[in-house]
Amino acid sequence: MHGHWQLQEAKQHFSELIRSVETEGPQVVTRHGEEVAVVVDIAEYRRLRGAGSDFKRFLRSSPDFDLLEIDRSEIPARIVDLGESE
């Protein structure tokens, strides 16, 4: 069956497993009939993981909001009664 490898077979034919990943895409490895791993191409792994773009870098790449000209009314949107309770 293409795309599925028993663990023992994957270990014995590792080079072939890697070639299959490169030519056919992700390969599933099973142990005792249960899927336990997927071998994927490094480019696909990096794409899925989001390599090269961490959250801090993303935030730092945002525009400088101090440069935006935003006009806001000085009038509050609603009046809040802060009546003193006794």
Image (spheres, grey):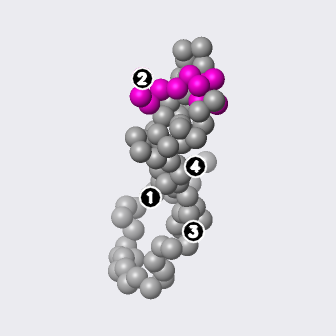
Q: Quadrant of residue 8?
A: top right
Give the Cα separation between the discs numbered 3 and 4: 49 Å
Q: Nearer the viewer, mark 1 or mark 2?
A: 2
Q: What are the residue bounds of the magenta stretch? A: 1-11
Q: Secondary structure at mark 4?
A: loop
Within-10-Å neighbours for mark 2: few <14, some 14–19, many 20+: few
State yes or no: discs 4 and 2 in contact (Cβ < 8 Å): no
Of the residues shown, which amino acid type is indicated by label 3? Arg
Q: Nearer the viewer, mark 3 or mark 4?
A: 3
Q: Nearer the viewer, mark 1 or mark 3?
A: 3
Of the residues shown, which amino acid type is indicated by label 1? Val
The residue that disc 2 covers is: 1
Among numbered discs 4 and 2, the one appearing first in the sequence: 2
Q: Position of residue 7 (x, y in %)?
A: 61, 24
In-image side of 7 versus 48 (left or right)? right
Among numbered discs 1 and 3, the one appearing first in the sequence: 3
Residue at position x 44%, y 85% from top?
Answer: 67
Q: Nearer the viewer, residue 42 or 76?
A: 42
The residue that disc 1 covers is: 80
The residue that disc 3 covers is: 57
Please say if 82 is above or below 38. Answer: below
Residue at position x 56%, y 63% from top?
Answer: 52
Give the Cα separation between the discs numbered 3 and 2: 43 Å
Residue 27 colored magenta? no
Among numbered discs 4 and 1, the one appearing first in the sequence: 1
Q: Residue furthest top?
A: 32
- Is residue 55 at all visible to an observer of this figure? no
Of the residues shown, which amino acid type is indicated by label 2? Met
Residue at position x 56%, y 22% from top?
Answer: 6
State yes or no: discs 4 and 1 in contact (Cβ < 8 Å): no
State yes or no: discs 3 and 2 in contact (Cβ < 8 Å): no
Among numbered discs 3 and 2, the one appearing first in the sequence: 2
